[in-house]
């Protein structure tokens, strides 16, 4: 089944040859983009959808979420808004609720949050384990997540569970737990931060994961300047996520590396942190991604548009840079070449805005602009 999407007022392709086009059309064939070009020269297809001059872009690639969870942390959020600082320890609240939930309850949460994201234009999602923190619970989280998202990351090194011995837990995460979960995930991550895992512990987990063939990601420099970015770059991680507190040396290290700096502005706002130095990263030549960090503690939103709007209005990215970071940047952070662009052969992940240009994402902040979504060639909205 092929679909001609025509009447595109502005088409963001993220394809170096095609760039941004006006009066364009696309042909989707099965789950792939089969043709892209000027509307006047479009071939015929089984069906035709005229989007009436609206803007079309690749679906959002949300490369950082924590969707396998149960429970609610409204009270913690309220106390933060009243002045209490965010701390890693809050994770334990969600661990207790998640362990107490049935598979069906966790799957219902995954289904609901993925559907919420897709309805807002997200077509490729990563999610992490990390609210189980036992061998059985982390394995359960990885298996459930794999049914609902494109990429799964093992985050047994999210927190030393309350009451556990730190050295013993580190041995478990980098040994038995990793061995059990590795066949079900592509990535491993560590929360390298005060109150979670220090540099030596983080290195141990990441090296063990790498020796099992997993790709690496790091939660780094979220709550203060620390070793996370340096370690991620040294170990060739695909991304280091948060990057809120960076030294000049961190920025330079990222710029000279293949590690993507994944920025999570909704989290920074929700935890009353400063926003990350996105402009400095881009100006230095670093690759930047934007992601939602959807989780019940530090960033309870699935909205990639919110990240893009914030990046433009408050972090001084251009609309083009922010949209690219939330599409092609996310794909790069996940080391994927099939998503985040709309060149021929790309996955048929298409987002149509109810607006004539992507500029409206910043010009009309907070307005739900998603008009249509195709995911793997299937019309979802
Ligand atoms: O990316 N920083 C560590 N992990 C999550 C928050 C988890 C939580 O507070 O439940 C994050 O912000």
Image (cartoon, rainbow, N blue to C red):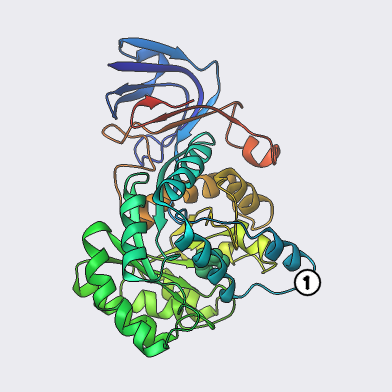
- Determine whether 351 is above or below 173 in the image: above
- Determine whether 216 is above or below 289 in the image: below
Using the rendered view, name the quadrant where residue 72 is placed. Answer: bottom right
- Determine the residue positioned at 51% across, 17% down: 51
Q: Residue furthest right?
A: 82
- Residue 154 percent location from the top left of the image: 34, 64
Residue 161 shows in this picture: yes
- Determine whether 328 is above or below 314 in the image: above
Q: Residues within 10 Å of mark 1 (few under 14, many from 20)?
A: few
Secondary structure at badge 1 equals: loop
Ligand 1 closer than 8 Å to label 1 CB: no
In the visual, does 348 lie left or right of 292?
left
Residue 280 shows in this picture: no
- Residue 87 percent location from the top left of the image: 61, 75
Residue designated by label 1: 83
- Residue 187 percent location from the top left of the image: 31, 62
- Residue 349 percent location from the top left of the image: 38, 34
**Quadrant that contains the N terminus:** top left
Give the camera-side residue of 255 and 297. 297
- Determine the residue positioned at 64% across, 34% down: 368
- Determine whether 12 is above or below 354 in the image: below
């Amino acid at each position: 089944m092929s679909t001609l999407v025509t009447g595109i007022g502005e088409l963001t392709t993220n394809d170096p040859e095609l760039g941004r086009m006006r009066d364009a059309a696309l042909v989707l064939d099965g789950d792939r983009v089969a043709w892209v070009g000027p509307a006047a020269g479009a071939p015929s297809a089984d069906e035709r959808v005229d989007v009436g001059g609206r803007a079309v872009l690749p679906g959002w690639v949300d490369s950082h979420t924590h969707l396998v969870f149960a429970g609610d942390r409204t009270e913690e959020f309220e106390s933060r808004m009243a002045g209490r600082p965010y701390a890693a320890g809050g994770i334990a609240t969600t661990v207790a609720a998640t362990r107490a939930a049935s598979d069906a309850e966790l799957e219902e949460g995954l289904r609901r949050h993925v559907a919420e994201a897709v309805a807002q234009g997200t077509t490729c999602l990563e999610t992490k384990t990390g609210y189980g923190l036992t061998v059985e619970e982390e394995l359960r989280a990885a298996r459930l997540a794999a049914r609902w998202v494109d990429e799964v990351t093992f985050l047994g090194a999210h927190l030393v569970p309350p009451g556990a011995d730190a050295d013993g837990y580190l041995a478990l995460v980098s040994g038995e737990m990793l061995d059990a979960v590795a066949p079900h995930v592509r990535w491993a991550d560590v929360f390298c931060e005060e109150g979670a895992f220090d540099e030596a512990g983080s290195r141990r987990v990441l090296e063990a994961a790498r020796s099992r063939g997993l790709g690496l990601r790091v939660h780094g420099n979220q709550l203060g300047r620390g070793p996370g970015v340096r370690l991620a770059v040294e170990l060739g991680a695909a991304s280091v996520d948060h990057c809120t507190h960076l030294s000049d040396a961190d920025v330079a290290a990222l710029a000279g590396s293949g590690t993507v700096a994944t920025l999570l502005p909704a989290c920074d706002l929700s935890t009353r942190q400063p926003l990350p130095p996105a402009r400095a990263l881009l100006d230095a030549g670093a690759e930047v991604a934007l992601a939602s960090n959807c989780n019940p503690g530090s960033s309870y939103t699935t909205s990639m548009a919110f990240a893009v709007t914030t990046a433009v209005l408050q972090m001084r990215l251009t609309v083009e840079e922010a949209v690219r970071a939330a599409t092609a940047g996310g794909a790069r952070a996940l080391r994927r070449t099939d998503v985040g662009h709309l060149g021929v052969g790309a996955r048929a992940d298409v987002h149509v805005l109810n607006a004539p240009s992507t500029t409206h994402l910043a010009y009309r902040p907070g307005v739900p602009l998603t008009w249509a979504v195709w995911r793997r060639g299937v019309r979802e909205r």
